[in-house]
Image (spheres, rainbow, N blue to C red):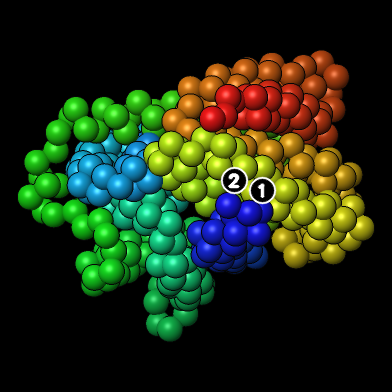
């Protein structure tokens, strides 16, 4: 395959995922903007809630990614019956895992918020938001199973469409429920949580309808197969997905500890940290789409026994992601104030955060390597390696951030310098692991 044909195949899979990520990003930013204008303290509440929420979501998504890798491999090998069984078992076990996740967030919301060291008002706002948002996990169990199958097949258009529906519903309900428009009661942060949860269910509903209606899809799970799960099949997904899940949880856990440390210094600084992280995430949403396409194509190539083609695919995807990073870095360093003003109108806050924009302008490059090459490594079923490097990264970030905050007193600047160092070290290790993989 030529570089041009590989790039085309990557973009066919990646483009809908990029659009999906961007519209979901818009959804979150509109959510936070509406809440921030309603009550500025709500931003810190959401900033604290998102990390325990993300830990659980990341674990569920990772188990689904295990199914995606196996589905891609079996499709590459032409074993469609095996691919169907992996998809059927994924539906059952995702639901089994999602239920206790919902229960933890719903029944222990106050304890979780207190454990993060937040102030009493943030505990109150955050626990309200978390309890309602917990219901989303009941929809994620279905949505992620469908997404795993579609990405494994390289069919991602419906995922994008579901994201657009989710965003439209969320924004409309935000305006209605937060402020009490169209005759609805003014619900504030609870209204935002309701809007997000209802929009998540709407996206899952659309994906199910699409999946049942599209007769061209080669993999169609049956109800009989879903309710006849074999642990011996699921264990294969877990062997691949569990290290990825633990890796994602470690990253999220590290972020949770960082928020806890920041709250000790300033209980409202978490909002600033999340704001900068969300700005950097703009670039992430582009190259994570490329990474998903890379995972699928690498998995299919490996399933077909074409290891050299798999490595070539990873390199082409990396080149594409670095182009995105160059554009982002130029924008972050030339107009940082204008970018920040999109998310906040407080001039003092914009002035304080501008130096951090230079750091994330550099950071996008190693992050893109870790995301794209990391997914290529996962596509080769080597998820343990990524777990090992993330374990090192989490310990390093927590340890160095503590020194930066409490010994050197560098505050948020020290944290972002630590994160940059970690990303650079891991990007070198991950690239070496991928590029030195023997080819046939």
Instruction: Identify the image quadrant of residue 415.
Output: top right
Identified at 54% across, 40% down, the residue is 310
Point out the residue furthest to the front here.
440
Residue 41: percent from the left, percent from the top? Answer: 62, 51
Would residue 75 be found to the left or right of residue 322 on screen? left
Q: Are marks 1 and 2 in contact (CB under 8 Å)?
A: yes
Would residue 34 be found to the left or right of residue 300 on screen? right
Residue 340 appears anywhere in the view:
yes
366 lies above or below 394: below
Residue 187: percent from the left, percent from the top? Answer: 44, 65
298 lies above or below 279: above
Would residue 185 be found to the left or right of residue 255 on screen? left
Q: Tell me the crowding category of disc 2: few under 14, some 14 to 19, or many 20 or more residues within 10 angstroms, Cα based.
A: many
Q: Tell me the crowding category of disc 1: few under 14, some 14 to 19, or many 20 or more residues within 10 angstroms, Cα based.
A: some
Mark seen at residue 316: 1
Q: Nearer the viewer, residue 435 or 327?
A: 435
415 lies above or below 228: above
Residue 384: percent from the left, percent from the top? Answer: 48, 22
Q: Nearer the viewer, residue 361 or 31?
A: 361
Identified at 52% across, 52% down, the residue is 293
> SS at mark 2?
helix
Residue 281: percent from the left, percent from the top? Answer: 66, 50
Q: CA distance from mark 1 to mark 2?
A: 5 Å
> SS at mark 1?
helix
Residue 25 appears anywhere in the view:
no
Identified at 87% across, 55% down, the residue is 330
Give the residue pinned by disc 2.
Answer: 313
């Amino acid at each position: 395959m030529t570089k041009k044909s590989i790039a085309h195949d990557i973009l066919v899979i990646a483009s809908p995922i990029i659009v999906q990520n961007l519209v979901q990003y818009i959804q979150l930013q509109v959510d936070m903007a509406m809440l921030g204008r309603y009550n500025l303290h709500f931003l810190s509440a959401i900033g604290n809630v998102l990390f325990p929420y993300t830990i659980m979501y990341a674990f569920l998504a990772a188990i689904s990614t295990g199914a995606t890798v196996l589905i891609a491999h079996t499709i590459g090998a032409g074993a469609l019956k095996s691919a169907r069984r992996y998809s059927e078992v994924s539906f059952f076990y995702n639901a089994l895992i999602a239920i206790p996740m919902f229960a933890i967030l719903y029944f222990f919301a106050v304890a979780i918020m207190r454990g993060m060291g937040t102030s009493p008002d943030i505990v109150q706002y955050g626990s309200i938001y978390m309890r309602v948002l917990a219901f989303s996990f009941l929809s994620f169990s279905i949505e992620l199973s469908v997404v795993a199958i579609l990405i494994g097949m390289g069919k991602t258009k419906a995922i994008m469409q579901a994201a657009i529906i989710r965003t439209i519903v969320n924004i409309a309900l935000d305006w209605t429920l937060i402020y009490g428009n169209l005759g609805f009661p003014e619900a504030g942060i609870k209204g935002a949580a309701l809007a997000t949860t209802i929009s998540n269910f709407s996206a899952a509903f659309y994906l199910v309808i699409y999946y049942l209606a599209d007769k061209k899809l080669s993999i169609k799970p049956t109800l009989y197969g879903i309710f006849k799960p074999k642990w011996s099949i699921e264990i294969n997904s877990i062997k691949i997905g569990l290290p990825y899940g633990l890796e994602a949880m470690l990253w999220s856990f590290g972020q949770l500890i960082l928020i806890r440390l920041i709250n000790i210094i300033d209980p409202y600084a978490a909002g600033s940290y999340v704001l900068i992280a969300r700005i950097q995430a703009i670039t992430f949403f582009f190259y994570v789409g490329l990474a998903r396409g890379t995972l699928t194509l690498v998995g299919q190539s490996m399933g077909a026994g074409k290891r050299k083609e798999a490595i070539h695919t990873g390199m082409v995807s990396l080149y594409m992601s670095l182009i995105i990073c160059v554009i982002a870095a130029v924008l972050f360093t030339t107009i940082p104030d204008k970018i920040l003003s999109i998310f906040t109108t407080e001039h003092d806050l914009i002035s304080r955060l501008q130096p951090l924009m230079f750091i994330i302008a550099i950071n996008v490059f190693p992050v893109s390597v870790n995301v794209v090459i990391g997914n290529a490594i996962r596509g080769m079923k080597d998820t343990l390696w990524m777990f090992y490097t993330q374990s090192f990264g989490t310990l390093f970030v927590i340890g160095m951030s503590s020194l930066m905050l409490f010994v050197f007193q560098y505050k948020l600047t020290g944290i972002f310098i630590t994160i940059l160092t970690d990303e650079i070290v891991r990007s070198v290790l991950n690239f070496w692991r991928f590029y030195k993989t023997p080819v046939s």
